[in-house]
Amino acid sequence: MADLKLPSRSEDFSEWYNQLVLRAELADYAPVRGCMIVRPYGWALWENITAQLDRRFKAAGHVNAAFPLLIPQSFISKEQSHVAGFSPELAVVTHGGGEKLEEPLVIRPTSETIIGHAYAKWIQSYRDLPVLINQWNSVVRWELRTKLFLRTLEFFWQEGHTAHATFDEAEAETRQMLDIYTDFAVNEAAIPVIPGKKSQSERFAGADATYSIEAMMGDGKALQAGTSHNLGQNFAKAFEIRYLDQGGALQHCWTTSWGLSTRFVGAIIMVHGDDQGLILPPRLAPHQVVIVPIFKNDEEKTLVFETAKKIREQLIKAEIRVKVDEREGQSPGFKFNDWEMRGVPLRIEIGPKDVAKGSLVLARRDKPGKEGKSFVSQDGIAESVTQQLAAVQRALLDRALAFRNTHTFEPKNMHDFQTAVEQGFARAYWCGDASCEEQIKEAAKATLRCIPLEQPGAAGACIFCEKHAKEMAIFGKAY
């Protein structure tokens, strides 16, 4: 399929995305509507994402555990705003073993309730706090409009759940996890994100405060790429998560939850990809380098493959993820196009003349044609490749940041605001009134993505009602 041209991003971004996910073999449609099969190449990318996040979580003191897939329906009902928020999306099991269940079981849409039940048993004293647990799993939310990776009935993610003695500790945890997501997005995925606080109408069902990282996709739309919630004492009171403080008084805990899902794979595709296919950031790419041997006969093949094997061994020793394309019956041109489709950051071309000269051709995926090619010595190849991979990583972040900057506007009136959200982000003052937010949403068909943590420091006038406003917000059309 690599020789078939993708739809153009500029002409049909949505279809470009759909075709790319399938042709690059990241995922496929499942027989159940709205579900996806994550293929090995897509799963390898997700594994690299999970490894980078898991390392950060553990460095911050978190440990992994596993909680059940099935949750008693009564648990979901205990926290009223939670059940109201999730009721339309619940998948419910009513029969098991051929018989009707006494109590229906909900397939987890998220795990605050089942974890709250466990924490109520485990936490007795201030000495038991904080509890810092994360789990890697899948959840089910009955979405009506679905899109591979971005919005599916079942999706894979991590969900962290913590319990603390005070509000300040819970808030510090919530913000720390937002910082971890921001660091991961920028430094591993080369995706610039805006960390900020959600408005009251956009916050998680059952949370006192929700923070998110918002990213701009290649079509100017926003994607919520990760969230962190301060749940206050809402779930602690619903599930009686209490502890004896140092004075012997019984107190309710303060809890948090935070998550990042396979939706982030979609973000990587839409931020970095081009009309030729994926462009994967080197730090997350399943294959950082692909070696394509070029030969015309068996004698040349033997010579070239011997060199390719030596190069591969040197790169593996330098902990570089490398693959030699040994496929029979495919031309070098076909292989070049195929690996471009799959977004491998760096390609090494080796032919008989290169073997004789002791040189190689390096081709960067982020720079098309001759611009991205360079000739390097086989000696010190690991160092050359390492430098090139770092250059690609930097270039992808710089390019994504430049795109976001040129597609972020500060409109002075609603007419300019409506024009701005058709092209990208509108950064505008908002008075904080929920009815004002709703009217903006209705007028511009755009949502308030977040109130950035970084603020200009000066007050202004609300973009809609022109009343006094203390903060600027990011508005945009979203996935």
Image (spheres, rainbow, N blue to C red):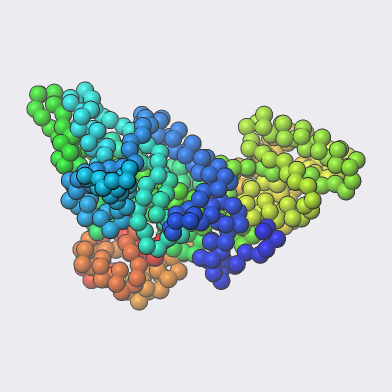
Judging depth in this view, the residue of 19 and 474 nearest the camera is: 19
Residue 370 location (% of width, % of height)? 74, 56
Using the rendered image of the protein, determine whether residue 458 is visible from the camera's viewpoint. Answer: no
Residue 101 location (% of width, % of height)? 25, 45
Q: Residue at (70%, 56%) from the top-left corner?
A: 337
Residue 300 location (% of width, % of height)? 88, 42
- Compared to residue 135, the image places residue 478 above or below, namely below
Judging depth in this view, the residue of 201 and 366 nearest the camera is: 201
Residue 411 location (% of width, % of height)? 36, 69
- Compared to residue 450, the image places residue 315 above or below, namely above
Circle count: 0
Judging depth in this view, the residue of 402 and 306 nearest the camera is: 306
Direction from residue 269 to residue 320 in the image, left or right: right
- Compared to residue 237, the image places residue 471 above or below, namely below
Report the residue that reaches farthest toward the bottom. 415
Q: Residue at (19%, 48%) from the top-left corner?
A: 77
Q: Quadrant of residue 415?
A: bottom left
Quadrant of image for the C terminus: bottom left
